[in-house]
Image: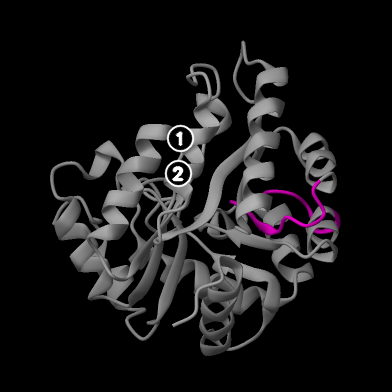
Amino acid sequence: MGLFMENIKDIKELEYIKGIFDTHAHYNDEKYENNREEIIKYVHENGVDYICNVGASFKDSEDSVKLAASHSFIYCSVGVHPFYVENLEKNWDKKFINLANNKKVVAVGEAGLDYSSKGFSKEKQFEVFEKQLDIAQSLNLPVIIHSRDAAQDTLDVIKNFPNVKGVIHCFSGDDVLALKYIDMGWYLGFTGVVTFKNANKTVRAVCAAPIERIVVETDCPYMAPEPLRGNVCNSVMLRFVIKKISEVKNIPVEEVLYHTKLNAFSLYKIKL
């Protein structure tokens, strides 16, 4: 159990927060390699009703589809993260469309732009991002957007696809940008970052965004919230994100739970 978190007491103090939909997780990550099924069983038995496991590369997406197929409460997405656009095979989009047609796939992504590393090809990132938006539009699927150090370019590309909607993953913009996306019909995904001490901008975005447009996500195994920062993250830790949103918006925890779960169903077009 050491992989879950050392400070289990902090989780138990929030046991009353149940019925969570983690809209963005990576349980096929190598950090879960030794006890993946044990962790998935643990989170489902401790307040997490649903998970969307998100693809970031072709192999990652294939693994996500397999993971979702073996768990009734796990859905998945297929996508090519901007870090993995360089080595795509020719006619990759045809294989991608076949994968996206799986019945457990509820979104395309994560797709987008990331200018945080050196030596990237902006042209290639644009090409693959726009192709995924085009595929999402043709399949009537929402899109999970990854945007880092590329806020204006991301916004400009999305504006060219007005019929495509989805979620801005791990939203890190300010309140002004938050309202722009909301006016365009998009959801905002908030992670453990909102609990960090230096997250003033993210907190302002939560304040500005209507609760009807907010979903919660871990991006696990990354982004563990305070007071568990530094641990390998899992979906149970969303209790701290939900509690923080409740405090910031001055509404009951139950209201945050209700809306974020309902919003997730709406975002991913899931009918139970």
Give left or right: position of 136 versus 65: right
Q: Position of residue 99 (x, y in %)?
A: 42, 45
For this orientation, the residue located farthest to the top is 119
Secondary structure predominantly adopted by residues drawn in magenta: loop
Q: Position of residue 250 (x, y in %)?
A: 67, 83
Q: Looking at the image, which is closer to me, 173 or 36?
A: 36
Q: Residues within 10 Å of mark 2 (few under 14, many from 20)?
A: few
Q: Position of residue 108 (x, y in %)?
A: 55, 49
Q: Residue drawn 61% across and 77% down?
A: 247
Q: Quadrant of the N terminus?
A: bottom left
What residue sits right under mark 1 in the picture?
Answer: 95
Cα–Cα span, label 2 and label 1: 5 Å
Within the magenta stretch, is there residue 62?
no
Question: Contact (CB < 8 A) between labels 2 and 1?
Answer: yes
Image quarter (top left, top right, bottom left or bottom right) of the C terminus: bottom left
Q: Which mark is residue 54?
A: none
- State left or right for residue 235 relative to residue 170: left
- The residue at which mark 2 appears reads as 98
- Magenta stretch: give its range: 161-176
Q: Is residue 167 magenta?
A: yes
What is the three-letter code of the residue carrying label 1? Lys
Q: Element type at marker 2?
A: helix
Residue sitting at x 74%, y 75%:
210
Q: Position of residue 27 (x, y in %)?
A: 31, 50
Answer left or right for 198 relative to 6: right
Q: Residues within 10 Å of mark 1 (few under 14, many from 20)?
A: few
> Looking at the image, is 47 positioned above or below residue 7?
below
The answer to whether residue 164 is seen in the rendering is yes
